Amino acid sequence: MFVKVTSSGSRRYLQLVEAYRDEHGKPKQRTVATLGRLDQLDGQLDQVIAGLARATGKPVTVNAPPAIVFESARAFGDVWALTELWHELGFDQLQRVFRRTRHEIDVEALLRIMVFNRLCDPESKLGVLRWLETVTLPGLALKAVSHHQLLRAMDALLDQHEAVEQTVADCYDRWWIRICRWCSMT
């Protein structure tokens, strides 16, 4: 047996059809039941399917649509703009300063995270960890950040404060020269 959709004019009907062979061995079909017009069946067809499943002892499976799960999007725009500005200003040069330290963590990246957090959503250092769960930081290779790592980055900043100040001053000087050149061109 199988289900067949037949047409009569503009109407379509759902039929339960049996295939068989006549006395000469020729394949034939006969309509066992007409289940109704396809446009009028709506939820009745589900009841028929459930009834047939119960009658045959098979479990009734309802083809419910998959549950939709909404996930909040991570913020990206402000952090991306700050990342571009960080690189444009030359603050990524701080990596050279912290390469010479005893720390095995990426101090420049952790400092960048803390600076961006202060600019986007200022909170405590523990708040930084919550904030990190809501943003996507472009170009950051850190898998996970811990409170301990943030404290070590602050220690490294204090240890290297003279070299950091010199690097930031050099970045400032380069930008000041660029601004002066730009102003003289206009």
Image: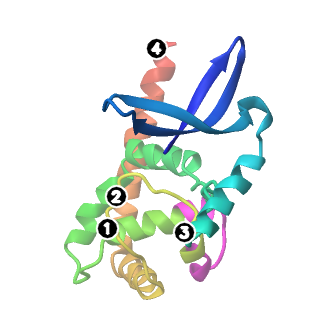
Which secondary structure, mark 4?
A: helix
Q: Contact, CB < 8 Å: mark 4 with mark 3?
A: no
Circle on res. 185? 4
Q: Which residue is mark 2?
A: 167
Mark 4: which amino acid?
A: Met
Residue 109: where, in percent of width, then height? 37, 65
Q: CA distance from mark 4 to mark 2?
A: 27 Å
Q: Which residue corresponds to mark 3?
A: 133
What range of the chain is rendered magenta? 116-128
- In the structure shown, which secondary structural element does the residue marked by tag 2 occupy? helix
Q: Residues within 10 Å of mark 2 (few under 14, many from 20)?
A: some
Q: Circles 4 and 1: CB distance less than 8 Å?
A: no
**Residue in the image at 44% along x and 83% along y:** 146
Residue count near mark 4 (Cα–Cα under 10 Å), binned few <14, some 14–19, many ≥20: few
- Foreground disc of the pair 4, 3: 3
4 or 158: nearer the viewer: 4
- Whichever of labels 4 and 1 marks the residue nearer the N terminus, that label is 1
* In-image side of 119 versus 41 (left or right): left
